[in-house]
Image: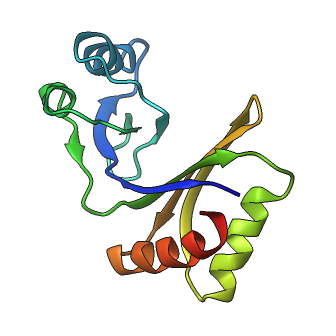
Amino acid sequence: MSFEITRVDVWAGELEDRPGALSTPLAHIMMSAGANLEFIVGRPSHETPGHSVLFVAPLTTDEQRQAAADVNMRKSDAMHVLRLSGPDRPGLTAGVAGMLAQASINIVGISAAAIGGNALVYVRFASADDAAAAEKVLAEVLV
């Protein structure tokens, strides 16, 4: 089973929780800088009532990273993420979670989608060391 496993930087920024607040940063990053975002997550802010947090990835060029900075987003140093891309099959994400559990590696966040026979999974870990260990474990099975 051939999977691509890569480390990905996730960018984050706080938004006012109001209609239209999401469209401005996304339009700037995607339309003006040409980013093809695979990962977009919004959630309420735990720190600031009345605000949300937006997470996006990947930003692959300096122009895209600058566009994110222009709308007050920054690379998250706290998010250690692996991107898994390859053929979908039943039980894929459960298998990944099980392999990592057997290796005593904790997953602190996951986002997965399957479209047209292909799977895309973003897995977050608590540390860069955990992400590196997970990459090694998964590469033995998925690549």
Q: Position of residue 104 (x, y in %)?
A: 59, 89
Residue 110 to residue 11: above or below = below
Q: Position of residue 85 (x, y in %)?
A: 58, 47
Residue 39 to residue 70: above or below = below
Image quadrant containing the C terminus: bottom right
Report the residue at 69% width, 77% height from top.
99
Q: Is residue 69 left or right of residue 52?
A: left
Q: Nearer the viewer, residue 80 or 47?
A: 80
Residue 110 to residue 139: above or below = above
The picture quadrant where one finds residue 87 is top right
The picture quadrant where one finds residue 61 is top left
How many numbered marks does the figure carry?
A: 0
Report the residue at 32% width, 30% height from top.
15
Q: Position of residue 116 (x, y in %)?
A: 75, 28
Residue 86 to residue 16: above or below = below
Report the residue at 29% width, 17% height from top.
34
The picture quadrant where one finds residue 92 is bottom right
Q: Nearer the viewer, residue 113 or 49?
A: 113
Image quadrant containing the N terminus: bottom right
Instruction: Tell me the colour scheme of the image.
Output: rainbow
Q: Nearer the viewer, residue 88 or 8?
A: 88
Report the residue at 40% width, 45% height from top.
45
Q: Is residue 91 left or right of residue 3?
A: right
Q: Position of residue 111 (x, y in %)?
A: 60, 48
Q: Is residue 55 left or right of residue 41?
A: left
